[in-house]
Amino acid sequence: MSCWAVVVAAGRGERAGLGHNKVFEPVRGRTVLARCLDAFTRSGRFDGVALVLSEQEIPAFEALRQREGPFPLVRRVVPGGASRRDSVYHGLEALPGDTQLVAIHDAARPFVTNDVIDATLDAAAQFGSGVISTPVTDTIKLLLPDGSVTTPDRGALRAVQTPQAFRFDMILKAHRSAQADAFPATDDAMLFEHYYGGVKLVTAPGAQENIKLTTRADFEAVAGRGFSDMRVGHGYDAHRLKSGRRLVLCGVEVPHDRGLDGHSDADVAVHALMDALLGALGLGDIGGHFPDTDPAYEGIDSMKLLQKVMDEVRAMGYGMGNADITIVAQKPKLAGFIPRMKARVAGALGVSPDRVNVKATTTERMGFEGEETGISAQAVALLIRDALNVPAN
């Protein structure tokens, strides 16, 4: 069954007081939008995502794709409209005609879980709609037109969230009708109710944690929450120096009379980092994942392999805490290249450069590094599974 998501990120987020669209704000080193897209990728339920942004922010997303992406599930980037309803409509119109189910989600809810996504999609497949909801815990007062107040039964009330999933043909037809009628709607469930008479409300584990980041206080609260799981890994690698090879370290080519010998580009620093990441999650080492007997990896850019390892990290529900890399080489001197190395590694890891440290040292001419017959590297990586993130599989 063809299933797409429309992720709406075109709002200005003025209540957050950040001076920019809140979806581009980092939360523990990874932006809100990247976390949201990670969740949809991790679910494994979607053929693609139509991401709706204000037109002037599309370049900012392309830059984000380079830093924290590549977000392969995002197959459409769509300019938003004057209202949320218009933005969703633009996203729906951009989907393939053979789409059967669609989930509409606010990018400002980056902690959506697999259970929540599954519940809404499964209900939509069966009933035509599936809207995630939670019981209301506060007492609600209803202000009547004459100014009097009444108290509805709290047990009959539900707070609705996104994702809201629907049969694609039904919600697209409803949106087209709303455009023609100028019908105002605060969410897609309200619009669906108006044209079809009701929606299927569903609950799922994780709905309480599916919070919407709206105000600065929301961001501060999320930043202050504890971690449910931390993992530390250590990696080490060494390669011989050989004439006729390029010297590549942390994805940066360094001028030298020799380069490192290996099946790939022999980026010893990135190899050590990959081993640290795999070790933190008990996933073995790079030899088991990218064997040097496989022609597919001959001469490959190790930064591409690092991105593949990070895909595995995210699939297990973890994010990057920080990484520390030490390169051991007598020559060449590397100090002038370290800022570029940090930026390259941070981009592959999907974090800001301040979460990556790269340093170089010599062995005072001792050992193979000191004799200039090889270069080695060591790396330590901290991985974090957020308390608000999905459990590992």
Image (cartoon, rainbow, N blue to C red):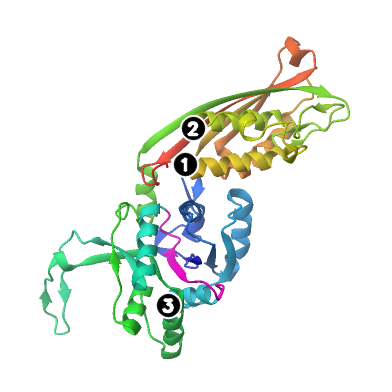
Q: Residue furthest bottom?
A: 181
Q: Which residue is mark 1?
A: 316
Residue at position x 60%, y 59% in the image: 60
Cα distance in 3D space between marks 3 and 1: 33 Å
Give yes or no for residue 107 being in the magenta stretch.
yes
Q: Which residue is mark 2?
A: 281
- Point out residue 299 in the picture as x, y percentages from the top left corner: 78, 37
Q: Which residue is mark 3?
A: 171
Residues rendered magenta in the picture: 94-110
Q: Relative to 26, does residue 376 appear above or below in the rendering?
A: above
Residue at position x 79%, y 33% in the image: 254
Q: Amino acid at mark 3?
A: Ile
**Front-most of residues 194 and 291:** 291
Q: Amino acid at mark 1?
A: Met
Q: Describe the element under mark 1 as helix, strand or loop.
A: loop
Residue 369 horizontal side relative to residue 274, left or right: right
Q: Relative to 118, does residue 370 appear above or below in the rendering?
A: above
Residue at position x 48%, y 28% in the image: 232
- The secondary structure that dominates the magenta segment is loop
Residue 147 horizontal side relative to residue 168, left or right: left
